[in-house]
Image: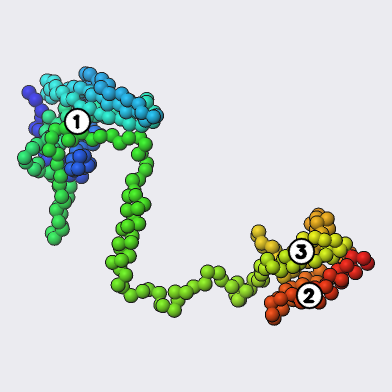
């Protein structure tokens, strides 16, 4: 009485390397099988109703909280019962599990399930190689069943195995690491990039030497569909502000930009060459009027012509403002204001 011939044949088969997992622990690579695979193999070999699992004992051996981060460690003892031709075969195993995270309930749940899974795998491992029994051996390299024949000329995969029975227990990841990738520090990446750049510095440049000096800004007025230049000159704005208001002749004035002289742009004023002096009151009145062209026509003032004349005064050949021209402009503004 015992296992059938088909079950014995399945229990003698080696572990399929496709389901072998490795992890780093204390500077060495450890091999293990996952809990779902062990349960799946038990269902395949013993039958879905041919075996059962019972948690005999589970206890919390450590529970700690530090600044909102919780830690819990559980141990568990599991009993596996297998029905084999009218008889019951019982195996037991113990295991431990650890959980970390910001939620105490989640931490204890993870640790408890990890300990039960670990104990289940150890109990099933006593049935043979398909459950990872070869991973517990020391001094020998267990034979692993290849998933498929390797082609000639290709190197065989490197197999790493544990050195202690406890080494096959996977440690659950802390919940704060779930879904996040671990990257090297930025300083290490910068050092690596600089080292790679020094190694490749001897290679010929991909860009010709004449193209190294690229202007910071592009002159869009040279395009096939050009955009108007928007010149900026703080000295000219200061000069315009020193002129009397074109409407009333009062001072000081604000340099008003004639919005209708150039197309509108998002967050950009027209060029500084289209500015005229207006006192604070008329400047506010103009912005409230809405129709700027009509506002100037009602006053019979050629604002565009005056703005061009002011620009010529500040941008003469010698770069200085002619005092005689400046006084003439002021007299003209006062005359227009009186009219």
Q: Earlier in the sequence, mark 1 or mark 2?
A: 1
Question: Residue 319 placed where, x, y %?
Answer: 69, 77
Q: Is residue 309 visible?
A: no
Number of numbered discs on residues: 3
Question: Residue 103 placed where, x, y %?
Answer: 39, 28
The residue at 14%/53% (across/down) is 156
Whole-angstrom CA distance, mark 1 to mark 3, is 87 Å
Residue 245 versus residue 82: which sits nearer the camera?
A: 245
Whole-angstrom CA distance, mark 1 to mark 2, is 99 Å
Which structural element holds mark 3? helix
Which structural element holds mark 1? helix
Residue 53 versus residue 123: which sits nearer the camera?
A: 123
The residue at 17%/35% (across/down) is 167
| Residue 241: assigned label | 3
| Colour setting | rainbow
Question: Residue 259 placed where, x, y %?
Answer: 75, 64
Whole-angstrom CA distance, mark 3 to mark 2, is 16 Å
How busy is the neighbourhood of tag 2: few (under 14 within 10 Å), some, or many (20 plus)? few
Q: Earlier in the sequence, mark 3 or mark 2?
A: 3
Q: Earlier in the sequence, mark 1 or mark 3?
A: 1
Q: Which quadrant: the N terminus?
A: top left
What residue would you read off at disc 1? 121
Farthest top residue? Answer: 56
Q: Which quadrant: the C terminus?
A: bottom right
């Amino acid at each position: 009485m015992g296992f059938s011939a088909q079950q014995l044949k399945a229990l003698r088969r080696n572990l399929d390397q496709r389901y072998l997992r490795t992890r780093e622990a204390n500077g060495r690579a450890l091999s293990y099988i996952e809990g779902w695979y062990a349960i799946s193999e038990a269902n395949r070999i013993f039958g879905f109703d041919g075996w059962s699992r019972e948690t005999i004992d589970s206890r919390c051996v450590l529970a700690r909280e530090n600044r909102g981060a919780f830690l819990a460690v559980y141990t568990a003892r599991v009993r596996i019962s297998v029905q084999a031709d009218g008889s019951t075969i019982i195996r037991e195993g113990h295991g431990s599990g650890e959980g970390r995270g910001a939620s105490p309930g989640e931490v204890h749940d993870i640790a408890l399930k990890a300990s039960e899974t670990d104990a289940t795998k150890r109990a099933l491992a006593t049935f043979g190689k398909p459950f990872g029994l070869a991973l517990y051996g020391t001094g020998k390299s267990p034979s692993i069943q290849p998933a498929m024949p390797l082609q000639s000329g290709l190197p065989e995969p490197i197999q790493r195995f544990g050195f202690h029975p406890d080494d096959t227990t996977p440690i659950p990841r802390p919940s704060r690491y779930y879904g996040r990738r671990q990257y090297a520090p930025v300083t290490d990446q910068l050092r690596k990039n600089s080292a790679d750049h020094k190694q490749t510095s001897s290679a010929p440049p991909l860009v010709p030497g004449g193209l190294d000096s690229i202007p910071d800004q592009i002159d869009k007025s040279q395009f096939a569909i050009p955009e108007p230049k928007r010149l900026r000159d703080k000295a000219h704005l200061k000069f315009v502000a020193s002129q009397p208001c074109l409407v009333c002749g009062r001072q000081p004035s604000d340099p008003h930009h004639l919005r209708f002289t150039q197309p509108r742009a998002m967050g950009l004023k027209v060029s500084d060459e289209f500015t005229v002096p207006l006192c604070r009151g008329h400047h506010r009145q103009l912005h409230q009027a809405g129709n700027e062209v009509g506002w100037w026509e009602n006053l019979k003032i050629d604002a565009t012509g005056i703005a061009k004349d002011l620009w010529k005064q500040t941008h003469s050949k010698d770069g200085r403002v002619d005092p005689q021209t400046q006084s003439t402009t002021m007299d003209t503004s006062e005359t227009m204001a009186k009219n």
